[in-house]
Image (cartoon, rainbow, N blue to C red):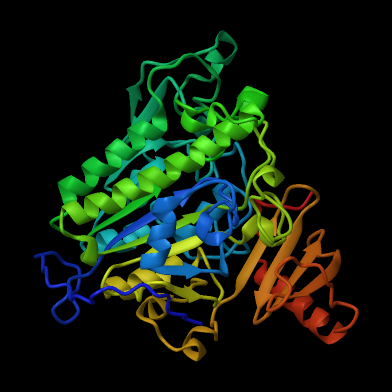
Amino acid sequence: MNRLSPFALVVAGIVAVCPVKARTVGESRSPNIVFIMADDLGYGDLGCFGQKILKTPRLDAMAAQGMRFTQFYAGCTVCAPSRSVLMTGRHMGRTIVRGNSTKPIVLRPQHPTVASLLKKAGYRTACIGKWGLGTPDKLSNPNDVGFDHFFGYVDMWHAHNFYPEFLIRNGQVQKLRNEVAPRWKSFQNPGQPQAGRGVAVRRVDYVPDLLIAEVEKFVRDNHRRPFFLFFSLNTPHANNEAGARGMEVRDLGEFGEKDWPEPEKGFAAMIRNIDRDTGRVLDLLGELGIEKDTLVIFTSDNGPHQEGGHKAEFFDSNGPLRGTKRDLTEGGIRVPTIAWWPGRIEPGTEDDAHWYFGDLMATVAELAGVKPPADIDSDSFAGSLRGEPREKRWNRKSRMYWEFYERGSAQAVRFGKWKAIRKPMFTGTIELYDMSNDPGEKHDFSKRRPDLARHAAQLLDSAHEPDPNWKVR
């Protein structure tokens, strides 16, 4: 339900009209859409979601001026499949990329995406940062599936490296001034699986700094027409190849003197930088006078990691939730999500309806005034942004379902206030949780409610569509 805070803003209409194909509604043009996604940020890592130690003033202010989604879910519990759900609007039982793999199982031009939908609607589209959607066999993969502009990492393993030797700009290699250690030289062949990974011995160009500069340039260059920007950070992920020194930052700043393990200092600096760079985006929208024309969504691709020497419990990254990245308990898939749209979203509101990454497709289609692709698993949360009554938001039409092929495999489904988990997939026992009063998943109802457990098993079975590329081993 929506709850008003003491904050108040003057509601202003959006009157700018641009001569593009995107449909306008009344006197308002189709909104710009900025989707900012952190990499492995936990539900409890932001002050506005309960973080007590690390400070996130810009994101906290964004939430105070906009809306917090308290039951928003990632597409999966690791990066590539989560992004596949986000881009296709299809849940894990039906999307193309269902795991992290070195095989070239990726989106192709014939697969509708959020980007291709908005591009056809007249939007200028960009992905800046970590594409990480499988292991593409073409460096132009993001451009091929709907993005006019791409700058960053195509390969997900490349994105581990904060000081790589190269990045990709619209299908072409852009050399940087960094140099990786000799043992990683065999991975410096762009276009090959896991290309670009490694640990730098010469550190000059810190990629997160390059990404925010590119974001600002794209917004400045395209602010006079509707645009869709997918700003996909690679923080606070670790450089796994660096082991316990994987939380790579340019400057620890105020955390350098803390009596904390070095990886936790690096993690804290990453959170500081995520907050700062999100603030830079919001400030630029204000500077250009387009903040009331722009919906900004901030979220994370999955739950918190325990890599690069970082421990999720050090800052209580999963908050009240159980589990972390690679779990289908809430800590692995429920993510902190904020929506900001001055003049449209009531300040200081909260939405506790359950949504997930797949819902972005139907939402942007509604906002842009176009028809979404057929055969997707996507409900629009545009009504929530407008402050619709709870009863209109709570009755989902599409399935929220997850599956995971590592660690012996697992499935999960959310239906109403209930969530079920089955490990391993297809043959395991059902765990059943009442999410309305047990977000920590401490009380299993499967024995007390065998009727619901049987229903959950049917939902899990019917949600999965076999795919020869993804088999339980």
Q: Position of residue 314 (x, y in %)?
A: 69, 42
| Up-down relation of residue 204 to residue 451 (above or below) | above
For image coordinates 40% across by 40% down, the residue present is: 129
Q: Is residue 74 visible?
A: no
Q: Position of residue 330 (x, y in %)?
A: 68, 62
**Residue situated in front as seen by the camera: 38 or 61:** 61
Q: Is residue 136 left or right of residue 456?
A: left
| Up-down relation of residue 330 to residue 215 (above or below) | below
**Residue situated in front as seen by the camera: 119 or 430:** 430
Q: Position of residue 380 (x, y in %)?
A: 43, 76
Residue most toward the right? 447
Q: Position of residue 21 (x, y in %)?
A: 16, 67
For image coordinates 22% across by 41% down, the residue present is: 217
For image coordinates 47% across by 76% down, the residue present is: 379
Q: Is residue 428 visible?
A: yes
**Residue situated in front as seen by the camera: 140 or 178:** 178
Residue 294: image quadrant is bottom left
Q: Is residue 209 left or right of residue 321?
A: left
Numbered marks: total: 0
| Up-down relation of residue 47 to residue 221 (above or below) | below
For image coordinates 56% across by 27% down, the residue present is: 257
Q: Is residue 128 left or right of residue 163?
A: left
